[in-house]
Amino acid sequence: MIKYCLKCKNCSLEFESWFSSSKEFDRLKKINHLKCQNCNSIRIEKSLMSPNLTNTKKKTYEHNVRKIKEVKNKLKNYQKFIKENFEFVGDNFAYEARSIHYDKKKEKKGIYGQASEQEVKELKNEGIETEIVPWINDKEN
């Protein structure tokens, strides 16, 4: 289906109409089946018509905002789980992770804290399992 903006050459009325194809418009015009709604003239022409575009930028923006909120909520849920089930060791994360890993007598427990990218690389190279979790401050909107 295609929608055309039509214009009467007799009375200058503009109106829209649907056609199954552009060939169908040409066929109906040729057999004089296109008439003006106002004056019944058969002098009908297609005029320029802008395409019906949705505001994709606005929809994309709204979609992105919704996705960001979903991700933030998931991260907050992960943070809540981590805080409730692991011990916070602050800036001593790398030291504590090594002491847990290498001390066979020490209780194996989950910890969380801060470490630099370099410290995380070194821990992984030593075979110490670590994961980086993005952290959202509670004060952020």
Image (tube, rainbow, N blue to C red):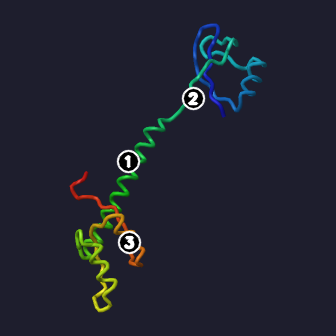
The answer to which of 76 and 22 lies nearer the viewer is 76
* Mark 1 Cα-neighbour bin, 10 Å: few <14, some 14–19, many ≥20: few
Pointers 3 and 1 in contact (CB under 8 A)? no
* CA separation in Å, label 2 and label 1: 27 Å
Residue 18, position as x, y percentages in the image: 64, 29
* Mark 2 Cα-neighbour bin, 10 Å: few <14, some 14–19, many ≥20: few
* CA separation in Å, label 3 and label 1: 36 Å
Residue reaching furthest to the bottom: 105
For residue 58, what is the image quadrant?
Answer: top left
* Mark 3 Cα-neighbour bin, 10 Å: few <14, some 14–19, many ≥20: few
Q: Amino acid at mark 3?
A: Glu
Say if 28 sits above or below 120 in the image.
Answer: above
Residue reaching furthest to the left: 139
Left/right placement of residue 133 relative to residue 45 reads left
Task: Say which element carries label 2.
Answer: loop
Q: Amino acid at mark 1?
A: Val
Find disc 1 in the rendering and name its residue.
Answer: 65
Residue 8, position as x, y percentages in the image: 63, 12
Q: Quadrant of the N terminus?
A: top right
Determine which of the numbered discs, if any, sits on residue 122 in the image.
3
Mark 3 or 1 closer to N-term?
Answer: 1
Q: Amino acid at mark 2?
A: Pro
Task: Say which element carries label 3.
Answer: helix
Residue 125, position as x, y percentages in the image: 42, 74
Q: How many marks?
A: 3
The answer to which of 76 and 115 lies nearer the viewer is 115
Residue at 71% across / 27% down in the picture? 22
Find disc 2 in the rendering and name its residue.
Answer: 51
The answer to which of 72 and 112 lies nearer the viewer is 112
